Amino acid sequence: MDRLEAMALLLTVVEKGSLSAAGRALHVPLATLSRKLSDLENLLGARLLMRTTRKLSLTDAGIAYVAAARRILEQVDEAERDAAGEFTEPKGELAITAPLMFGRLHLLPIVADFLAAHDAITVRLILADRNVDLVGDHVDMALRIGTLPDSAMVATQVGTMRMVCCASPALLAIHGMPDVPADLQRHPCVAVDTPMPVPSWRFRDPASGAALDIAIAPRLAVTTPEAAADAATLGVGIVRVLHYQVADAVRRGALAVMLEAFEPEAAPVHLVHAARGQMPLKMRRFLDFAAPRLRERLRNIASTRPANSA
């Protein structure tokens, strides 16, 4: 049996929390995955996993073996990168992930300039509105908007992103400008319908800093922030999205930002990558190239005002 393959399979099972989830992520039949793990346990003469219908957990031997396997695979990965010259020369494929709209508008132009400056590097850019598993999906770096969970990832902050409320001037001419968040309950609103919808919009009391949760009954619910912003420009209702998703419409005067004093604290924006001993030069070069350019773009978004404003 291939021990390194078996170690990698075991780590994926532990990271995903179940055999079926690992099988889907690896595109390996469940029966094949189960057999390879059983072969590994037979080779070791020890049970590594305790499997029930409800959950999967590691035995004491499994905990120790997973820790050792992770170290071994990291060393093998580093040795392969070293042999390929990735620590002495910036070359090879760089896999990067980012939110769909932000990646298309703001990261893609930076990637294009980076590729023009580095002939020996290729980039696989994964744009998706979900947190891609960097380790499981073999991704080198991610751009993340929002507070990061505690993890083994290394993060470089490149700015912040506001959550803003806005509406078309035509709508505000009919319904008036809300003075406080509670006024939104008397205005038509557009919501983004997510897999885990939130029935309220969160604001912050500027005096006390306390959270203000305002229940919203939207006139229209859509599945993407882009569609919500489009609906707002058409006068359907007030929308609440990340600032970059409406920055162009605000600049054109198609949308007006409101309730700025009540906005929640701006979310941090980071470039993150998995912790490892030595960073391949392709990653170091991209981080050094992209971070200042992203900071400039995020500053420009934060300062967005209507083009005709004084």
Image (spheres, rainbow, N blue to C red):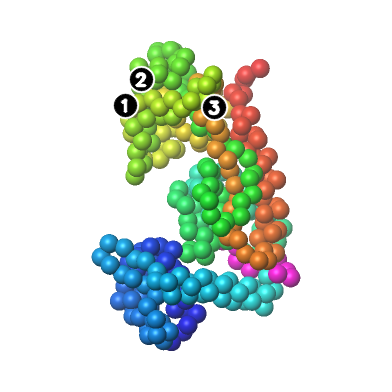
The residue type indicated by label 1 comes to Ala
How far, Cα to Cα, is label 1 from label 3? 24 Å
Q: Which residue is mark 3?
A: 250
Most foreground residue, 303 or 118 = 303
Q: Is residue 221 left or right of residue 15?
A: left
Residue 168 position, x and y percent, is: 46, 22
Do the CB atoms of the residues marked 2 and 1 lie less than 8 Å apart?
yes
Q: Residue furthest front?
A: 60
Which region of the structure is painted magenta? 87-96
Crowding at mark 2 (Cα within 10 Å: few <14, some 14-19, many 20+):
some
Mark 3 or 2: in front is: 2
Residue 95 position, x and y percent, is: 56, 61
Query: Does residue 105 sit above or below 284 in this rendering?
Result: above
Q: Which residue is mark 1?
A: 217
Q: Which residue occupies 57% across, 72% down?
A: 71
Query: Where on the picture, by quarter, is residue 63?
Result: bottom left
Q: Which residue is mark 2?
A: 185
The residue type indicated by label 3 comes to Val
How far, Cα to Cα, is label 3 from label 2? 23 Å
Crowding at mark 1 (Cα within 10 Å: few <14, some 14-19, many 20+):
some
Dot placed on the residue nearer the N-terminal end, 3 or 2: 2
Most foreground residue, 295 or 228 = 295
Residue 201 is inside the magenta segment? no
Q: In the rendered image, is residue 175 in sight? A: yes
**Kind of element beneath mark 2:** helix
Mark 1 or 3: in front is: 1
Query: Does residue 21 sit above or below 215 in this rendering?
Result: below
Dot placed on the residue nearer the N-terminal end, 2 or 1: 2
Most foreground residue, 118 or 274 = 274
Q: Quadrant of the C terminus?
A: top right
